[in-house]
Image (cartoon, rainbow, N blue to C red):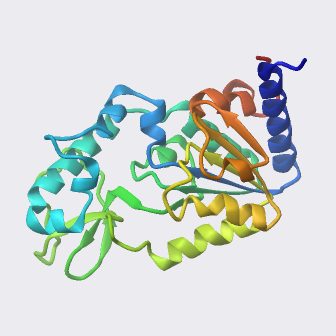
Amino acid sequence: MTHHSELAADRVRWAAQLLRRTADRAGHIVAVSSADLSAQGGEPPLRAAAQPWRDLRPDQLADPQAFEHDPKQIWEWYAWQRELVAQSEPGSAHRIVAEIEARAENFALVTESIDGLHQRAGSRKVVELRGSIWRMRCTEEGAVFTDTRVPLPELPPLCTCGKLLRPDVVWHGEALAQEVLDEALGAARHCDLMLAIGTSGLTQPAASLPITAKRAGASVIEINPVPTRISWAMDAVLAGRPEEVLPRLWPLDQAASPGQATSE
């Protein structure tokens, strides 16, 4: 009888070999990462950022009505997140995604994360579905610019025109920028291999990207601690946290020779 651990090892080995072949043959690879990838993997500061703040849940704070009612409080929350991220380092999942990009000729990363840790790890071809806490947008003129100062000298910050600035992120009830959505869907439709990393299969549009890729003929590998609503459609489902599974597909110390999966 074949044991579950042997089947899991076979799936990891197959996925690692497919990833290596696709990169070596200049195939198109797309990684889709979740909003809480940093909290899943990493350091205590980032796990803290996913918890209630001043007895308020994140969904109560990432809200345009909450910002309209009390912009200073919302900016205090984002300033706190910025400080936590500034104190943290990219995790192994971030670094491996960046190394795959460096090796692959055709690669794109689509992320729900707003913390910028993918870029700090070295990722360059990044589609940020929900924006970035390191950018600000003028509520009057719509101008967008980067501001990485920690701490911010003034809360809430004001634009040079004197109007209020807001974080350049997508809040609950707001639509994604059409050009960002088009770029993400285009990447999914034209890839040969997609890695769905830590995604829940629930939030749109990220949940639809693996299905879009499958329908276009791509192979899709899901890496997640628990099954999702789209697991049934994946070519391989690798159970586990991304920072534990990804090193078995693409070892950080052997990035030039991925596919050397370990046995379970």
Q: Which residue is situated farthest in the bottom direction here? A: 141
Locate residue 50, reporting x and y percent.
33, 40
Locate residue 253, reporting x and y percent.
69, 24
Q: Residue at x 61, y 63 (%)?
A: 208
Q: Is residue 2 left or right of residue 52?
A: right
Q: Is residue 160 above or below residue 23?
A: below
Can residue 108 be seen here? The reply is yes
Q: Is residue 208 left or right of residue 134?
A: right
Q: Residue at x 32, y 31 (%)?
A: 45
In-front residue for pair 186/213: 213
Quarter of the image where the C terminus is located: top right
Can residue 257 be seen here? The reply is no
Q: Is residue 240 above or below residue 127?
A: above
Q: Is residue 52 above or below residue 229?
A: above
Residue 49: image quadrant is top left
In-front residue for pair 10/165: 10
In-front residue for pair 243/138: 243
Locate residue 257, reporting x and y percent.
82, 32
Quarter of the image where the N terminus is located: top right
Q: Residue at x 51, y 55 (%)?
A: 202
